[in-house]
Image: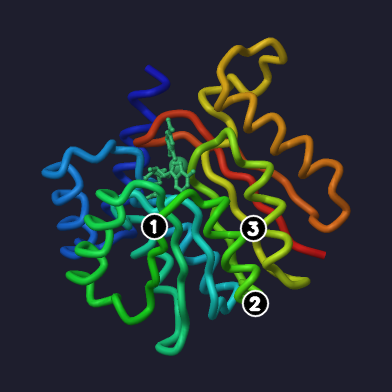
């Protein structure tokens, strides 16, 4: 019952507030055709990311975890014409599909996808003097969330917004004895958020088309 009503309400909100969007719909179709896992953010959550990046006035965005570029498209659309989003992806196939999806959305000039393990790409970005980024979206392998937060902080400035996806994981985040490595990664991420003086954060639980999960939202001091 609960899950049915969340799904219906998420669909209702989408139908009311998100007009038909051929580029995003085509990206999801291409992801299915390429057999990518359907773990993109939902439409209403993609729009939330888009609005937050716009509210921020973000000109430079860092995304960790591209998949097929669904969230990348939402975020890139928040950028001004001279803005940029750098998105990090370990799987060459995902990066290739994402690049095609972003091209058909007309956003290639705003997006740079870097293929390879994100920890390596982040080190390289820092060495290049990239950043500071105005907005950071962490959505890759949950085991490395705490390390991604550290890199996000190093590549940020006071006022940068940091968002991390999937921090509730069907509620398993509260299980101190969990054997699940992803949940443990999320717990280490919360420990770092709690103890790192460089960021001020909260987290919100979400329900909807993608089940029960949540976002962490932080502001760099
Ligand atoms: N942000 C996307 C979903 C990302 S799914 C969206 O909402 O549309 C997580 C992605 O992180 C997957 O494509 C996976 O291949 C990638 N990933 C996993 N481990 C990674 C790593 N070590 N470095 C970079 N990307 C990684
Ligand atoms: C997983 C990853 C995600 O980014 C997501 O939104 C949902 C699930 C996963 O690795 O299981
Ligand atoms: Mg996610």
User: Residue 176, relative to residue 31: is it above or below?
Assistant: above
Q: Position of residue 195 (x, y in %)?
A: 86, 43
Q: Quadrant of residue 69?
A: bottom left
Mark identifier at residue 115: 1
Under circle 2, the secondary element is loop
Tell me: is circle 2 under 8 Å from ligand 1: no
Under circle 3, the secondary element is strand
Q: Residue furthest bottom?
A: 82
- Disc 1 and disc 3 in contact, CB within 8 angstroms: no
Assign ligand 2 to one image quadrant: top left
Q: Position of residue 30 (x, y in %)?
A: 15, 51
**Mark 3 Cα shell of 10 Å, populated few (<14), some (14-19), many (≥20):** many
Q: Residue at x 41, y 63 (%)?
A: 114
Cα distance between the residues tagged 1 and 3: 22 Å
Left/right of residue 23 with respect to residue 43 in the rendered view: left
Q: Residue at x 67, y 50 (%)?
A: 149
Under circle 1, the secondary element is strand
**Upstream in sequence: badge 2 or badge 1:** 1
Q: Residue at x 36, y 28 (%)?
A: 5
Q: Position of residue 123 (x, y in %)?
A: 62, 60
Where the N terminus falls, by quadrant? top left
Mark identifier at residue 129: 2
């Amino acid at each position: 019952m609960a899950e049915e009503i969340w799904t219906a309400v998420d669909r209702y909100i989408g139908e009311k507030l998100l007009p038909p969007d051929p580029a995003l719909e085509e990206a999801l179709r291409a992801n299915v055709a390429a057999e990518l896992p359907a773990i993109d953010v939902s439409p209403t959550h993609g729009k939330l990311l888009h609005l937050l990046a716009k509210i921020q006035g973000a000109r430079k965005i860092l995304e960790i975890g591209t998949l097929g570029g669904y969230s990348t498209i939402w975020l890139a659309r928040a950028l001004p014409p001279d803005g940029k989003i750098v998105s990090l992806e370990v799987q060459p196939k995902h990066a290739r599909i994402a690049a095609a999806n972003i091209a058909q959305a007309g956003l290639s000039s705003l997006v740079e996808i870097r293929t390879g393990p994100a920890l390596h790409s982040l080190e390289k970005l820092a060495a290049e003097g990239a950043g500071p980024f105005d907005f950071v979206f962490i959505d890759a392998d949950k085991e490395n969330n705490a390390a991604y937060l550290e890199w996000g902080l190093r590549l940020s400035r006071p006022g940068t917004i940091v968002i991390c996806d999937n921090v509730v994981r069907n509620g398993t985040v509260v299980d101190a004895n969990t054997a699940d490595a992803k949940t443990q990664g999320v717990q280490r991420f919360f420990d770092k958020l709690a103890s790192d003086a460089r960021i001020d954060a909260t987290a919100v639980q979400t329900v909807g088309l993608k089940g029960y999960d949540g976002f962490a939202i932080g502001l760099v001091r």
